Amino acid sequence: MIVKTIDQFQKAVPTTVSIENFSDVEPYIASAELWTRSQVLGNDLYAYVDALVDPAGDDLTLQKLCINIISNHAYWDAIPFLDLVHTESGFAVISANNKVPASKERVERLREQCLIRRDNETELLITFLEGRIIYHDDWKGSPAYSVMTDCLIRTATELQQYGSWEGSRRDFLKLRPKLIQETMMRLEPVFSKDYIEELIEKQRDNEIVGDDVKVIELLKYAIGSLVNGNPEAAEKIAADALRYMDSHLISFPTYTASSEYLARTMANYENDADSPIFSSLH
C-alpha cells in the first residue's frame, strides 16, 4: 500500500486527527488504492510508488500526490461508516463526550470537499507526470493512461484553458464522451481519422513538434469552442487549421495520404473565408 501509516493519512486529511488506529480506515484506504491504481497510475507506476522508501526530489512529490489522492478518496468513502455501529438491535450512533454532532449538511460538504481535493490532486499528478520523462515507461504503457489520453483534450485543466470552461475533474470525465464524439463527427471527416489518431498518439509520446504544435493547439481551441456552445468560433478556428495544413502539405504526410484529403481535393474544394468546412456544426 502507498498509504502505510495513520500519520500519512492524517497529514493528507487534517480532520482525521482523532482517528488513532490505522485499522479503522485501512479497508477504505485499500479500496482507494485500487481506484488510484486502475484509474490513474496503472500497475507498474503504482508498484514503483508503493516500493518507495525515504523518497526525495521528484519521488517525494510523486508519493505525496498519491497519498493525498488515496487518503481523500478513502475518507470520502469512510465518512458514512465512522460514527455508526451495528448492534443486536440495529444501528447506533457512536457518541463523544462534550462534542456536538455535525449536521448532515456539514458532513455532506466535507465529503464533497474530499472529492474536490482528490480530483484537484489528480489533475496536479497528471501534469506532474507529463513533465517527468523518468516515469513515462511505467505510466504510459498502462491501460489507465491509454483510457485517460484517448482524446485531444486530456484533462479538466486543459479544457479550462481551451474552452473557457468551468468544472471539476468529475464534470470533465462526464464530458469526455462528448469530446470524443465531437472529434469523431466534426474533425475526423475534415482532418482525417488517421491524422487525428496520429496526433493523439504523438501527444501520448510527447512527440508533438514542428507544424503539429500549431495544428493541435487550434484543434483543441475548436473542441473547446464546441463544448462552450460556440460552433461559429469552432468552425473559424478549424478553418484556420485547415488552411495552415493546406499551405504546409509537406509537413502532414498522413493527412495528405488520407481518403478524406483525397476526396476533398478531387471535389475541387477551395478553403476560403466563405466555405464552411463542416456544416454539420449548425
Image (spheres, rainbow, N blue to C red):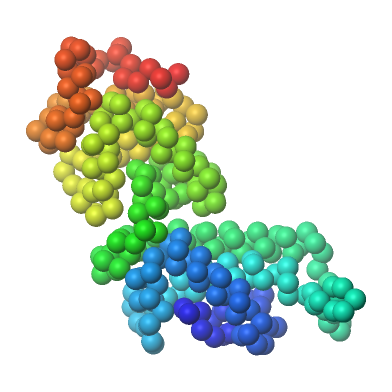
Q: Position of residue 264 (x, y in %)?
A: 21, 18
Q: Position of residue 143 (x, y in %)?
A: 37, 58
Q: Is residue 254 visible?
A: yes
Query: Is residue 240 positioned above or below 46 on the image?
Result: above
Residue 143 horizontal side relative to residue 116, left or right: left
Q: Position of residue 173 (x, y in %)?
A: 50, 48
Residue 28 horizontal side relative to residue 2, left or right: right
Q: Is residue 10 visible?
A: no
- Picture quadrant where residue 217 is located: top left
How many numbered marks appear? Answer: 0
Q: Position of residue 214 (x, y in %)?
A: 24, 38
Residue nearest the viewer, comparing 21 with 240? 21
- Residue at the extreme right of the image, as rendered: 89
Residue nearest the viewer, comparing 259 with 121? 259
Residue at 58%, 84% (x, y): give it: 6
- Picture quadrant where residue 133 is located: bottom left
Residue at 58%, 59% (x, y): give it: 116
Query: Is residue 104 positioned above or below 279 on the image?
Result: below
Residue at 45%, 18% (x, y): give it: 282
Residue 280 horizontal side relative to residue 114, left or right: left
Residue nearest the viewer, comparing 3 with 231? 3
Residue at 26%, 66% (x, y): give it: 137
- Picture quadrant where residue 54 is located: bottom left
- Residue at the extreme front of the image, as rendered: 88
Residue nearest the viewer, comparing 14 with 34? 34
